[in-house]
Image: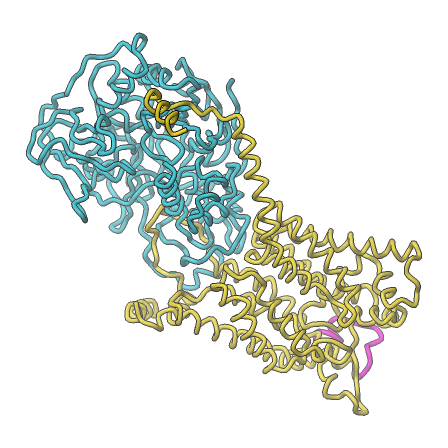
């Protein structure tokens, strides 16, 4: 039964520089790279040494604790460099792309007839599996477990994030194929939440339960939708997949090719012409960044949106899960009496001589300044106003900080991912690193309880 | 080279040094730092702790100014008699009142801030953390909640005690259990009771003139009531004087009107919790009503020492004494108060309820708000605990309908389980 999910608590952060809905083809990158930090909690084991030729979609490393979970190359070419960090930990894999792309092909599968175990094996081998994530712990899903439901958020409410409807346009066939396969992996339902049930490409998809979500950010976060539709209990497993990844999974199931092509939004106030680009996973960001042009010399480039992405340089590569690249001004400057003078050009949830409450629709050009120093938690009651989940955010954060496993469990850490705390982090007066605290809490719980 | 660059160079010079927190405290007072986000989200709201604390101070400034004028007004009125036809501009806002008030009150402010911040700086330097802003509000609250003639050394001793024992031993701002300003007030009250109660301390000059031919006295309204002198009190002060605050009392607590405005401002600015304020008002009204009912039923004889305060109209409790000030500025302290929204209702209600109860039953000193708040500070974590347990219980209840599916390779997993059992 479909549910209308109406979120009241939350905050829409209106920023300057939303991507215009036109797509350009990005020039192809010479070198593509996989950033291993994208795969949280995976210890990679290489299948090849440097210098080996690989095809697009050919496995290049696997999960050390699970050998049948393979990770594939987004392009065909030569594996030129394995960048290692401290204790020889692999950081990045760089592949010098061929001019002519060759695919590692397998025979397409007849999903209707396939067994569940066959589908799982196929997804694991094809490199599509890492797109499937699980709650609890917000890590790549464990294929041995059966999820009680699968959640897909077809609605992006994060600031400057790519529009899902636009990304999925014309890809209904692939999405349907992916949904058909995923439907066999759970005895439960595939819940898809969209902002508008009429215009969303999901409206025509079969085998899902369509929900309409409305309200401010984080209405579009899958964590919010899980909590409102069918919350995760202790011992339960829920899988989540981002809608853009359905395209890659679907195309693989239909054609037998892992096509890493992806449309991304280039946005932010530092971009001269913010718009969408068609590129590939792992492409160098500069291949499309300078096509749109940057306004300022000092800017922060973010793989992802401003709330959950991570910082990169223009020479870095598009992340595995990304659909957004954002550039906003760096704010490493002092401001005279910034703490007591009235503020008109920044967002605030209070009215302490801050005036963003006067102009709700105004778009802001925020920089990366923290607007204050890190402090102990002092103020209370603020987080709850932007946190729609039935969880006590402050208490959960504190439980994670003191590593109280029982308390973390009881207060609902199973239900959340770091991104669910991105808004409380944004409004935090004490400038505490909420997402980091939650990530460390999840890792600890995963490690201790498994 | 501008001040900004100079300060930046100094900051780099101090980096990693022992005195860095002290320098940074001054630096960040002038400039919000050039710090950028490095983990999680890349943008942050405009507010920080300094702004939050500054907003509370803004809300306190009217009370301070009123306190300065009232100090002068009460002093001269006690000597020369209260004016017949009171006029705000003629009798209250005058240079004489202001000068006398400023000379008496500002030293309290200076000692409170000077000593308190010194302790904060010392602790910040020793422990190597930044100077936190909590004391900015405490330092302003303290002079407003003490009798005007409190000796400065006494205040200094109390501030040191309050900041060290009330806050720093727990780990500083954000970690304390008791409200530091009230810890200071409680220390003064229990260590130097003769300076904190009676009819000689509320008006400037009364103590030194005591026993001389020029002796003056200034009994607070609660003092009158506690002694059963209800008629005398009403002869001296009318309702509007109580509400607007032209009465003796601690420096900043007398004007319910300005406190109300300050409270509304804090609620509007979303700095202080309206839940605590509203429920505390309700709590005090409830207790007041109970006492009024007890009197109405005739259970308390008129000669009882509780009669004066018990028969006092329930809503008037809010406009005399320190109750309003406590509710608006002290009960709403987010660190020592309840942290959950539901907890705030209970916490606030009990503060109001207990304040009026202590006020009536306290034999030595007819005011209870600071004791009530300190008591509830101690119980706030307990209240929160039960509120949070409610959430945990809800989650456990949900767990009963959980669909926990077996592992996919259930063959081996099930077998292993059977063996271990």
x%, y% of residue A147? 40, 24
- From where the camera sits, is residue B350 visible? yes
Q: Total label count?
A: 0
Residue B406 falls within the magenta-colored stretch:
no
Question: B412 and B155: which one is in front?
Answer: B412
Q: Residue at x 28, y 21 (%)?
A: A249
Q: Is residue A6 above or below residue B391?
A: above
Q: Which residues are magenta?
A: B80-95
How far from the left and from the top, in percent, is residue A64?
A: 22, 34
Q: Is residue A166 visible?
A: no
Give the colour scheme of this rendering: by chain
Q: Quadrant of residue B367?
A: bottom right
Q: Residue at x 75, y 63 (%)?
A: B358
| Chain letter, yellow | B
Please identify the quarter of the rendering in which residue A304 is found. Answer: top left
- Residue at left offset 87%, top offset 61%: B311
Q: Nearer the viewer, residue A444 or A207?
A: A444
Q: Residue furthest left?
A: A51
Q: Quadrant of the N terminus of chain B?
A: bottom left
- Residue found at the very far top of the displayed protein: A113
Left or right for A72, reference B84: left
Which x, y percent locates residue A427?
Answer: 46, 48
Q: Quadrant of the C terminus of chain B?
A: top left
Rendered colour, chain A: cyan
Residue B281 coordinates in the image, percent (x, y): 72, 54
- Residue B82, relative to residue B50: is it above or below? below
Using residue B81 as the reference point, say whether residue A56 is left or right of it.
Answer: left
Q: Is residue B341 above or below residue B6?
A: above
Residue at the bottom extreme of this rendering: B213
Q: Is-magenta flag for residue B86?
A: yes
- Does residue A273 appear left or right of residue A59 in this picture? right
């Amino acid at each position: 039964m479909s549910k209308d999910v109406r979120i009241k608590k939350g905050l829409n952060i209106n920023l300057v520089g939303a991507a215009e809905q036109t797509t350009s083809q990005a020039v192809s990158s010479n070198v593509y790279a996989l950033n291993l930090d994208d795969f949280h909690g995976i210890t990679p084991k290489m299948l090849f040494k440097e210098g080996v030729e690989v095809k697009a979609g050919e496995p290049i490393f696997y999960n050390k604790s699970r050998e049948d979970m393979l990770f594939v190359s987004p392009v065909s070419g030569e594996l030129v460099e394995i960048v290692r960090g401290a204790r020889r930990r692999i950081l990045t894999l760089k592949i010098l792309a061929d001019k002519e792309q060759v695919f590692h092909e397998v025979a397409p599968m007849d999903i209707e007839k396939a067994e569940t175990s066959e589908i799982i094996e196929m997804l694991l081998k094809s490199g599509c599996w890492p797109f499937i994530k699980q709650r609890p712990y917000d890590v790549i899903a464990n294929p041995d477990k059966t999820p009680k439901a699968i959640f897909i958020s077809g609605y992006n409410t994060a600031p400057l994030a790519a529009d899902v409807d636009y990304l999925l346009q014309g890809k209904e066939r692939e999405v349907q194929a992916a949904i058909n396969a995923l439907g066999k992996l759970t005895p439960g339902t595939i819940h898809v939440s969209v902002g508008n049930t009429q215009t969303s490409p999901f409206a025509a998809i079969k085998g899902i339960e369509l929900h309409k979500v409305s309200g401010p950010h984080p209405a579009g976060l899958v964590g919010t939708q899980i909590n409102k539709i069918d919350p995760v209990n202790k011992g339960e497993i829920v899988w989540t997949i981002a809608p853009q990844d359905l395209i890659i999974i679907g195309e693989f199931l239909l054609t037998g090719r892992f096509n890493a092509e992806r449309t991304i939004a280039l946005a932010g106030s530092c971009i001269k012409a913010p718009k969408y680009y068609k590129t590939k996973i792992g492409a160098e960001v500069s291949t499309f960044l300078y096509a749109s042009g940057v306004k300022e010399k000092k800017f922060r480039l973010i793989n992802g949106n401003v709330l959950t992405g991570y910082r990169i340089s223009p020479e870095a590569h598009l992340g595995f899960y990304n659909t957004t690249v954002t550039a906003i001004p760096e704010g490493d400057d002092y401001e005279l009496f910034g703490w007591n003078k009235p503020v008109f050009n920044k967002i605030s949830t209070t009215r302490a001589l801050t005036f963003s409450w006067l102009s709700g629709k105004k778009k802001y050009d925020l920089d990366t300044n923290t607007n204050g120093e890190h402090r102990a938690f002092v103020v209370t009651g603020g987080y709850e106003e932007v946190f729609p989940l039935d969880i006590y955010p402050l208490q959960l954060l504190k439980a994670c900080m003191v590593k109280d496993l029982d308390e973390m469990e009881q207060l609902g850490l199973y239900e959340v991912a770091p991104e669910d705390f991105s808004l409380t982090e944004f409004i935090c007066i004490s400038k505490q690193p909420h997402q980091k605290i939650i990530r460390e809490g999840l890792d600890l719980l995963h490690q201790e309880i498994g | 080279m501008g001040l900004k660059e100079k300060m930046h160079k100094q900051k780099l010079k101090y980096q990693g040094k022992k005195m860095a927190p002290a320098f940074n405290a001054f630096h960040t007072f002038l400039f919000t730092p050039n710090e950028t986000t490095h983990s999680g989200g890349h943008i942050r709201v405009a507010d920080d702790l300094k702004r939050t604390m500054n907003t509370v101070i803004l809300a306190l400034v009217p009370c301070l100014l009123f306190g300065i004028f009232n100090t002068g007004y009460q002093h001269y009125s006690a000597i020369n008699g209260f004016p017949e036809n009171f006029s705000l501009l003629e009798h209250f806002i005058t240079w004489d009142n202001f000068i006398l008030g400023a000379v008496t009150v500002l030293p309290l402010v200076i000692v409170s801030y000077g000593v308190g911040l010194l302790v904060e700086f010392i602790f910040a330097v020793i422990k190597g953390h930044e100077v936190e802003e909590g004391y900015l509000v405490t330092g302003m609250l303290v002079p407003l909640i003490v009798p005007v003639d409190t000796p400065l050394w006494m205040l200094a001793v109390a501030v040191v005690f309050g900041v060290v024992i009330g806050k720093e031993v727990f780990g500083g701002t954000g970690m304390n259990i008791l409200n530091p300003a009230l810890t200071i007030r409680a220390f003064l009250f229990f260590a130097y009771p003769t300076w904190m109660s009676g009819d000689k301390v509320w008006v400037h000059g009364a103590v030194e003139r005591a026993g001389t031919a020029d002796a003056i006295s200034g009994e607070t309204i609660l003092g009158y009531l506690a002694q059963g002198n209800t008629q005398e009190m009403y002869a001296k002060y009318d309702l509007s004087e109580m509400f607007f605050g032209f009465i003796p009392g601690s420096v900043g607590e007398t004007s319910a009107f300005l406190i109300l405005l300050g409270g509304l401002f804090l609620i509007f600015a979303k700095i202080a919790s309206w839940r605590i304020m509203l429920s505390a008002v309700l709590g005090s009204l409830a207790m007041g009503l109970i006492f009024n009912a007890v009197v109405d039923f005739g259970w308390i004889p008129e000669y009882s020492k509780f009669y004066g305060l018990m028969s006092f109209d329930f809503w008037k409790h809010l406009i005399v004494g320190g109750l309003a000030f406590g509710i608006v500025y002290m009960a709403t302290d987010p660190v020592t108060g309840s942290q959950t929204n539901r907890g705030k209702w209970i916490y606030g209600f009990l503060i109001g309820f207990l304040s009026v109860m202590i006020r009536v039953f306290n034999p030595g000193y007819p005011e209870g708000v600071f004791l009530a708040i300190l008591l509830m500070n101690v119980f706030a974590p307990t209240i929160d605990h039960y509120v949070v347990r409610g959430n945990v219980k809800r989650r456990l209840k949900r767990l009963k309908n959980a669909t926990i599916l077996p592992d996919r390779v259930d063959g081996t997993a099930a077998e292993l389980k059977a063996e271990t059992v």
